[in-house]
Image (cartoon, coloured by chain):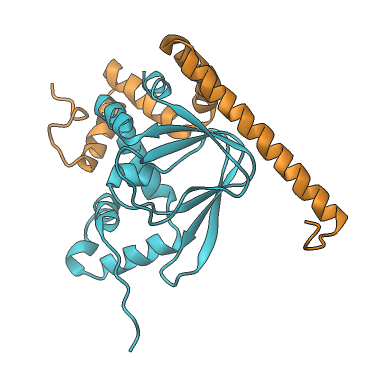
Amino acid sequence: MLLDSIVVTLGSSLNLPDEEVIKQDDNKADDELAMFFCGTGHCRVKVRDHNGREQVIGILKEGEHFGEIALIYKCKRSATVISSNYNTFARILKPRFREVISEFPEYEICLKNNAIKNYRDKKIQFILRMIKRVEYLAKHDDEVLYDLMFSLTPKPFEKD
Amino acid sequence: MENVDLPPNLRKEIREYFQTILLTMQQQNELDAFIKNISPSLALKVRGHMFASVLKERNLIIKQTQQIIIKSSMGIPEAIEADKNNSSFLGAPSSPLTIDA
């Protein structure tokens, strides 16, 4: 089953308090990219919004996952995750993750559904609002908009 | 710490922090070495023991996916319908989720 397939691919890592596990906008090579599961400890999720303000948007507890967005959508890291205390993480590297997904495509769908349902921080809301201003795109479902959103490369421009 | 004249309480806190870090790092290194030195099948069991229960009990997405997989394999219409609705995510009409009669 899915759980067995995931467990056999997992590696482990220990992170110290206040250590960055992943960093927003990081763009690592495929073989270094990983999705993480909290084994023990808590960590906090921070997102820097379109104004450059960083906010804690959530706390991750034992059993919860993070880092899947970059693997699913092939984009940069969408958030920063910092360990709040001594954390043991299980991590699955991208090549292994793709193998699991090819065996259980339902897992990718559930991960995407979860992202669409729960990942609604200010930055995401801002980009979605921007996309929906385009009349043609406004008609599409969130699944399409999320695919599009994570494939966009942000480019800031200085004020006059 | 002496050079910057830190107060005793802060020095104590820093010392404890370093001690804990060194200890936990050592534990992690020991675990890594332990897993490398045992056979792959035993390493699998160790990792399974470390993470399987926490993922099984607390990761909702894995739970949810397993339920969908079970329902799909049993041919329960609700699951099939849900899968069909979701298959657009993959953008592939012939994806494994679309169950054809």
Looking at the picture, does residue B31 appear above or below residue A88? above
Chain A: drawing colour: cyan
Relative placement, left or right, of B17 versus A94 is right
Relative placement, left or right, of B73 versus B37 is left
- Residue at the location (20% across, 69% down)? A135
Name the quarter where the N terminus of chain A is drawn: top left
Which of the 4 image quarters holds residue A158?
Answer: bottom left
Q: Position of residue B19 (x, y in %)?
A: 73, 38
Relative placement, left or right, of A117 versus B95 is right
Looking at the picture, does residue A138 appear above or below residue B52? below
Which of the 4 image quarters holds residue B68?
Answer: top left
- Residue at the location (33% across, 67% down)? A129
Q: Nearer the viewer, residue B68 or B11?
A: B11
- Residue at the location (29% across, 32% down)? A95
Name the quarter where the C terminus of chain A is drawn: bottom left
Q: Position of residue A57 (x, y in %)?
A: 53, 56
Q: Nearer the viewer, residue B4 or A13?
A: B4
